[in-house]
Image (spheres, grey):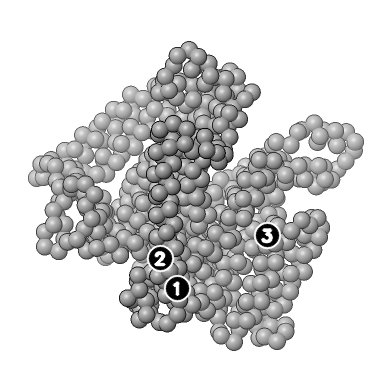
Amino acid sequence: MNALDLGWLSQRAGFQLSESLLRVSPDDSYAQLILAGAVNTLAVAAIAIPLATLLGTLLGVLRLTRHPLLDRSLSLLIEPIRNTPVLLQLFLWYALLLALPPIREAWQPLPGISLSNRGLSLPALSGLRWSPILLGLSLLVLAPWFKRRWHWPLWLSAALALIVGALGQYQAPLQWSVPQLVGLGVRGGWTLSPELTTLLVGLSIFHASYISDVVRGSILAVPAGQVQAGLALGMRWPSLAQTVIYPYAARVGIPPYANQCLMLLKNSTLAIAIGFQDLMAIINTAITQTGKAVEGMTLAMAFYLCIGMLVATALSAYNRRITRASLLSSGGMRLGHMLPTPKWSYAALFTGAWRSALTIVLAAALAWLAWRSVQWGLLDAVWTGGAQSCRAAAGACWTVISANIQLLMFGTIASAQRSQAAVCCGLLVLVVLALFYLPLRPRYRALAVVVLGSLIVAILQGIGPWPALPTVSWGGVLSTLTLALLAIVLSIPLAIILALLRMQAPSWLAWPVAACIDAIRSIPLVVLLLVCSFWIPLFFQGDWSASKLLLALIALVLHTSCMLAEVLRGALQAVPTGQTLAAKALGMSQLTIITTIVLPQARRLATPAALGVFVGAIKDTSLVAIIGVFDTLAAAKAVIAATEWRPYFAEVYLFAAVFYLLLCVPLSIMAKRSNRH
């Protein structure tokens, strides 16, 4: 392999960025435009993480109220968000924004703030240089997480960065700028494009749903005795929350919250799917123009590895700081024991004026939403006819589903072979039932999977009444189910091997394995998909144009196995070492100890978290459309691409969301039940 050639970074890029915090032009070099893309990526994360944190904290605290109707309503809101792909949600938000009124009819919730199909316009200070300001704000946020001797240097650096940003351009004095309609556009203020607005809204809401569970679970883990002692001493709730609840809750919540921050940073790469020019979009354009796939993907991986390590290091430093002092009374009754899920009762709904008012308001709002949903989805809906019959209708246009059901279910598979694909999809569903739902012994479960898998392979290879069905023509549900199942099944043995090597192999082998696991976990799946689609055809010569499904599967298996390996490592560490020592004293071999003692116990301990990883693997299949695999979400996009069906995007995305919910919700329920046991 030749050495990396980075000389192209100094060449003229020749393309324009539609939106950038840095001032760049087509005459600038690739390096300058890539830097601008990196700043765009960091800006998305810097804005979305605080928004997700605030919204998630609010939802988590609201879910702690003892009001059953509010608790169920928030759960009903959060579960669909958690169990559908974030890319699908971004597509929905983007379509909703583009369907808003034009700029002259923009919605103005507050003076100076307007929302239209051009994006979100906000008041801002003109003359500011936003890059130093973002750097300064980031330093201010990170400073408290480090040791005290680092506080003053970080605060001084933040102050200098804010001053530089406030000075702005010399010819542009600072002034408060309010967006105003001029001609067909907006002048002044800060206008966020529909793409950037979609990213901020979609990522903030998606990760807020997970952060709300982190906040709720962390507070419920606080020892009840400490709270009762504080109340007995006359402490008020603000002081009690700051001095008693937060120190305990932070110890439990910081690690999963850090994971959500890293996941949000990685999910920002989905900007490439909706047209926002972040780092990945610009590198992808540069690769297309220069052909430097290895160099471009290496730069992308290095960036995300460095940023991920910085965020993880900062959160780890803060976690060490809050856990350096031991806390008493770590056991005993927790708030979760005192505050179980509220049950339906008259007293829980109508005791007190505020509780009664909240019940009436929530009931009225839910009744109105239910009626509007029934009216839109059933009473006023159009079920037959073409697109013409939907234009005058006030309800949903389900005709778009019935007219395009073949495309949504089977993609570009020939009509003569769709029955073949339908049979394979039915057998894949039986594999799912055998793996997760049917009460079978492990040996019979494995036998059922092998038999059904062999039958599916035989049908796809043309053994039977149908001809062979090549993978290049796969699409729709067949692609999604196949990728999801293979990613789960193939990742399990690979994850076991990786976890055992990381824990029990010699150091010369354990360290590279650990580095590989941490590196793949830190790289966004979008980057991993693009790396596989660029690098594998480059290093392994041949015609890979018909093997995009295989390239996507390689990336999914690598990502899922590394995520699952960490879950298994934690479960293996929880197995009592005394049992291993006793088995060795009885003369049992290492392989027998692992297969008969360690792994069975680790499997039970790891089941809840492993099911969560499997849910993530199912949702991750929606990303394969980025490299050209025609999955269910790509089929939905193809339907909406037709001009006659474009106004009915909500019905198509709702169909895709129901499909993913049918796959993910049962696994999520199983994970919660196994976690309680």
What crowding class fits label 3: few (fewer than 14 Cα within 10 Å), some (14-19), or many (20 or more)? some
Q: Residue 376 bears which disc, if any?
A: 2
Q: Residue 356 bears which disc, if any?
A: none
- For badge 3, the amino acid type reads Val
Q: Secondary structure at mark 2?
A: helix
Does residue 351 appear anywhere in the picture?
Answer: yes
Residue located beneath label 1 in the image: 398
Q: Going by the image, does 427 lie left or right of 396? A: right
Q: Going by the image, does 355 lie left or right of 462? A: left
Residue located beneath label 3 in the image: 489
In-front residue for pair 578/170: 578
Q: Secondary structure at mark 1?
A: loop
Q: Going by the image, does 355 lie left or right of 466? A: left
- For badge 1, the amino acid type reads Trp
Distance from the alpha carbon under mark 1 to that under mark 3? 36 Å
What crowding class fits label 1: few (fewer than 14 Cα within 10 Å), some (14-19), or many (20 or more)? many
Distance from the alpha carbon under mark 2 to that under mark 3? 41 Å
Mark in front: 2 vs 3: 2
**Disc on the earlier residue, 2 or 3:** 2
Quadrant position of residue 222: top right
Q: Going by the image, does 15 lie left or right of 224? A: left
Mark in front: 2 vs 1: 2
